[in-house]
Image: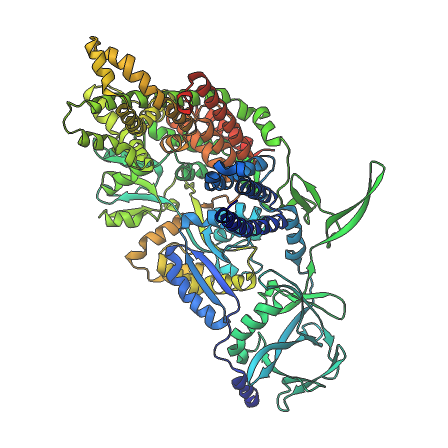
């Protein structure tokens, strides 16, 4: 190995190490965040890249690395994710994972009892060069007994990743004769001689806390911003004080946080022991602290019981449902029922769309390819317009301007005007004519594409073949049949298969024009005469109880299998790719 | 007292450090009023309020993506029918206490309630009414029968007497509900989604009325929203059914229009159509780090008389507070005519169900209406099938 190659190898190695180190860190972080799928996929990607770069046999593959990265991130991962989602109940009501939901139940649910002990409070802060600091103590006054309590600034128990305090705790110490003992320190209240206001609180070590803010005292209003943003906004809003009776005291939501009240966490966790199958099992369960009832878990929901003894769902989480989503497609009569009809129409629609667009596109391409035709550029430009206008706009023009039963141009001027028909055609409300209409529009939208690719393919057919044919005395049609068409199909056939797959899933084309309608009378599902699989399943998955991503994923996997299988069969039978891959 | 004041003066600080920040997603219309409230809030609380403009149509979907990840805003503005889905997903924080709740219209508060809890501070209510072209209509009809008669008289080759988007359940609902059809039974603990009243006698009567309009040739076949809208703008339609979002366009088009609120037109003696009432309001992100501040801003600032009046001035839509309504109605000029008429219409309306199950109703009832309009099946069969569809979609 000469020194130049060695140097190159070392540089590659160093770069690869750095890349690998970052990649590995990402993998570890993703794993730690329970994002196992992405972690594994990234890991496999990293290993393959390393293999390709280090192993001499991998040399030809190294130019594929960018494509491989995109393949893994944009194709493999979404496929994995869809597959994973298909086996869950992810959707409305099931948005969080089970640990997240338990965390939420434990930390977010509080209740203020019917007769809480309420406390007024005032804040005393330590000053530094006449400015308030966030060192403070809270003086509570019980509304019921007028007793005073002192609490030091709460200690942080839990913080989130951004440093926000999620839980802080402190204790309330009774004040007797204006004196209190707090954690071994003595505090003395200093009252004003005139009005008996408590002006400050002084500790035996000489610390001095000045009266700063109380929600009920309008003279302290100017200090409100500091209190709200620095003291309450940081320290008090998630603070829990324990009063001498051992009760939890928090800001009172029912008074919009202007006083404190005893409140309880609604849910707690406890370990229960149960015997299942002869073995003793220890299980952590969530229970309602008020009623003592253990929450039942069913169908990915935590259920509690309300005051009337009625069970209700508290929170839902994502859970595995096995093959339920797939079985639903087979077993549910509302899905399997109109399925055959919709399945057949989906094929018809895709096949006819390809046929019509191709025939028209081919015909126009042949005309435009004629060298005797003048102004081909203008025709070509005009013919591409349907393709250039966004389908979202042109489909709506067709729907409202062309096909409207009473006012549409087709009925008004062509059907009734030109042909003098007595009754208008029910374009969008008759099942047959609605099908004609969607095919018509789709042909209009699709033929420029076919025309363009055919024009391109036509250029590649050598002129000598036609010369030889005309010397042999072949007619125009014979030339088309024997030379043009076969040679054309080599290039175009794979694209026709692609176009078929595209139209098989052409959601926009159907949904914008008819929305799948007109409805099939008497059906118990939202099935319509022009519904194709994807639009029908979209309605099923998203027009029930909110969204059902799990079910939608299962259906898209089914559609993938159908389309993939068909394409494979098609390629096999037509041998379309054999010419290309040779 | 002087000594106390002295201490206050010493302690007084001009600029408090801004620790927390509330982020609001709002659509364009509410921004001017919100900005003023935000400035007040910042002065009183020392907490900054950042208003981010998001397209109204995108707010819900963006919120559904951002909020579970803990990224979303603290407050969003939205429609009441989002509440069910968002609350069921655990993304909304209930409002623990709403001061002056007696000043809010009952319909506005019930629209934002789900499972017995209030999930938003409403600020505007709206519903649809019958809009007519004063150049074509000389006398205001007092019953639907009179309206039919007048419309038939006005109609000729070019002009349509009565047209609206009848295939759309939203616009046809007033006539169905007027006779006693209902979607989900309203119970004490919220809506009972298993009690559906869309194929009862009232609903059948209402849909039959709609069918009659087509059979009599009163409403042209193929009528839809765009067609109605453009015909009315061109002065070619006498009576239509539409909402407050459309009237500025009609004014710009130079149409001299009037609005008949649904409480002033009778289906039969003593029975008026009952439109859907849509309510908009401000909702709080359950995963917000600044829930306390967000709740206070929503309740005490946006929900206050001044706040809601500011919203009203900015948007000119039906207000959710009675005192604001009384205040503006007292010396309302002609420019408030639309607002007042649509508010009257809302007074006989019912809130659009805010449960996620409502998604199944739209499609099923749209299908039923189109089947009836196109004469493919009887009214009874179509409605029974629709209820079947809804029950199947809801499950259980």
Give the vertical position of A244 relative to A524 (above or below).
below
> Image check: A330 left or right of A168?
left
Name the side, left or right, on which B295 lies relative to A474. right
Please determine whether, in this image, residue B236 is positioned above or below residue A421: below
Q: Residue at x 72, y 73 (%)?
A: A172
On the image, the x and y values in percent for residue A243 come to 73, 70
Q: Nearer the viewer, residue A394 or A110?
A: A394
Q: Is residue A87 shown left or right of residue A404?
A: right
In this view, the residue farthest toward the front is A2
Q: Is residue B329 visible?
A: no
Q: Residue A335 appears at what percent x and percent y?
A: 53, 26
Residue B47 screen position, x and y as percent: 50, 68
Q: Which quarter of the image is occupied by the C terminus of chain A? A: top left
Q: Does residue A205 lie above or below A392 as drawn?
A: below
In this view, the residue farthest toward the bottom is A193
What's the residue at 34%, 30% (across, down)? B213
């Amino acid at each position: 190995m000469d020194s130049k190659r060695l140097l190159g190898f070392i540089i590659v190695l160093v770069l690869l190490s750095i890349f690998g180190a970052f990649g590995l860190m990402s993998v570890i972080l993703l794993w730690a965040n329970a994002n196992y799928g992405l972690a594994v996929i990234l890991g496999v990607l990293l290993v393959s890249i390393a293999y390709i770069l280090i192993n001499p046999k991998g040399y030809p593959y190294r130019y594929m690395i960018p494509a491989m990265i995109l393949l893994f991130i944009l194709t493999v991962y979404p496929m994995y994710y869809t597959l994973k989602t298909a086996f869950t109940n992810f959707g409305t009501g099931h948005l969080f994972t089970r640990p997240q939901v338990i965390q939420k139940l434990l930390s977010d649910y509080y209740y203020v009892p019917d007769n809480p002990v309420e406390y007024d409070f005032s804040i005393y802060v330590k000053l530094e060069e006449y400015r308030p600091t966030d060192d403070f103590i809270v003086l509570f006054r019980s509304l019921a007994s007028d007793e005073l309590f002192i609490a030091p600034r709460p200690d942080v128990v839990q913080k989130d990743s951004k440093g926000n305090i999620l839980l802080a705790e402190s204790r309330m110490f009774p004040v007797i004769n204006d004196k209190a003992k707090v954690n071994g320190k003595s505090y003395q209240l200093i009252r004003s001689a005139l009005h008996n206001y408590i002006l400050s609180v002084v500790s035996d070590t000489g610390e001095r806390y000045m009266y700063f803010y109380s929600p009920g005292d309008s003279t302290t209003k100017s200090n409100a911003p500091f209190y709200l943003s620095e003291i309450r906004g940081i320290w008090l809003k998630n603070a829990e004080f324990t009063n001498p009776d051992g009760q939890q005291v928090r800001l009172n939501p029912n008074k919009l946080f202007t006083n404190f009240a005893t409140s309880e966490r609604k849910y707690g966790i406890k370990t229960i022991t149960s015997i299942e199958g002869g073995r003793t099992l220890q299980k952590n369960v969530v229970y309602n602290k008020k009623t003592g009832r253990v929450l039942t878990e069913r169908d990915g929901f935590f259920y509690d019981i309300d005051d009337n003894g009625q069970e209700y769902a508290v929170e839902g989480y994502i859970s595995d449902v096995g093959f339920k989503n797939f079985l639903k497609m087979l077993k549910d009569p509302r899905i399997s029922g109109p399925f055959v009809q919709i399945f057949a129409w989906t094929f018809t629609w895709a096949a006819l769309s390809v046929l019509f667009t191709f025939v028209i596109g081919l015909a126009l391409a042949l005309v435009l390819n004629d060298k005797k035709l003048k102004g081909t550029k203008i025709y070509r430009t005009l013919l591409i317009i349907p393709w250039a206008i966004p389908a979202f706009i042109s489909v709506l023009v067709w729907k409202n301007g062309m096909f409207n039963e009473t006012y549409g141009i087709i009925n008004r001027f062509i059907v009734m005007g030109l042909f003098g028909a007595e009754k208008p055609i029910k374009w969008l409300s008759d099942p047959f004519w609605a099908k004609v209409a969607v095919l018509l529009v789709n042909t209009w939208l699709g033929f420029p594409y076919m025309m363009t690719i055919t024009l391109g393919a036509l250029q590649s057919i050598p002129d000598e073949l036609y010369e030889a044919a005309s010397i042999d005395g072949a007619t125009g049609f014979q030339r088309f049949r024997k030379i043009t068409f076969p040679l054309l199909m080599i290039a175009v056939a794979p694209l026709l298969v692609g176009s078929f797959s595209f139209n098989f899933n052409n959601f926009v084309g159907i949904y914008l024009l008819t929305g799948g309608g007109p409805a099939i009378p008497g059906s118990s599902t939202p099935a319509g005469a022009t519904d194709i699989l994807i639009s029908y399943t979209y309605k099923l998955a998203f027009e029930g109880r909110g969204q059902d991503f799990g079910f939608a994923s299962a259906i898209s996997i089914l559609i993938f299998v159908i389309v993939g299988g068909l394409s494979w069969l098609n390629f096999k039978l037509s041998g379309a790719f054999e010419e290309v891959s040779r | 007292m002087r000594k106390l004041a002295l201490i206050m003066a010493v302690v007084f600080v001009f600029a408090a450090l801004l620790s927390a920040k509330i982020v609001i997603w709002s659509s364009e219309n509410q921004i001017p009023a919100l900005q003023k409230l935000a400035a007040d809030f910042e002065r009183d609380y020392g907490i900054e309020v950042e208003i981010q403009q998001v397209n109204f149509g995108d707010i819900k979907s963006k919120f559904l993506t951002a909020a579970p990840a803990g990224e979303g805003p603290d407050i969003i503005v939205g429609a009441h029918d989002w509440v069910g889905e968002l609350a069921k997903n655990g993304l909304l924080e209930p409002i623990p206490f709403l001061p002056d709740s007696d000043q809010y219209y009952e319909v506005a508060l019930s629209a934002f309630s789900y499972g017995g809890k209030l999930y938003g501070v409403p600020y505007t209510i709206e519903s649809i009414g019958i809009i007519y072209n004063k150049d074509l209509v000389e006398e205001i009809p007092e019953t639907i029968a009179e309206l039919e008669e007048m419309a038939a008289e006005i109609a000729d080759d070019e002009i349509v007497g009565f047209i609206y988007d009848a295939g759309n359940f939203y616009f046809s609902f007033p006539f169905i509900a007027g006779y006693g059809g209902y979607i989900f039974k309203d119970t004490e603990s919220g809506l009972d989604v298993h009690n559906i009243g869309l194929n009862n006698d009232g609903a059948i009567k209402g849909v039959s009325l709609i069918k009659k309009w087509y059979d009599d040739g009163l409403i042209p076949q193929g009528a839809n929203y765009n067609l109605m809208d453009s015909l009315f703008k061109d002065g070619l339609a006498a009576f239509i059914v539409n909402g407050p979002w459309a009237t500025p366009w009609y004014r710009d088009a130079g149409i001299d229009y009037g609005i008949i609120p649904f409480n002033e037109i009778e289906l039969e003696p003593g029975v008026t159509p009952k439109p859907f009432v849509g309510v908009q309001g401000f909702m709080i992100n359950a995963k917000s780090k600044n829930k306390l501040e967000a709740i206070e801003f929503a309740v005490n600032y946006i929900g206050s008389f001044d706040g809601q009046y500011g919203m009203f001035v900015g948007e000119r839509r039906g207000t959710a507070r009675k005192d604001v309504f009384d205040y503006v109605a007292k010396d309302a000029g002609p420019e408030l005519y639309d607002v007042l008429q649509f508010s009257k219409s809302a007074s006989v309306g019912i809130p659009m169900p805010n449960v996620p199950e409502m998604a199944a109703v739209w499609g099923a009832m749209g299908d039923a209406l189109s089947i009836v309009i196109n004469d493919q099946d009887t009214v009874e069969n179509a409605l029974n099938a629709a209820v079947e569809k809804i029950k199947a979609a809801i499950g259980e």
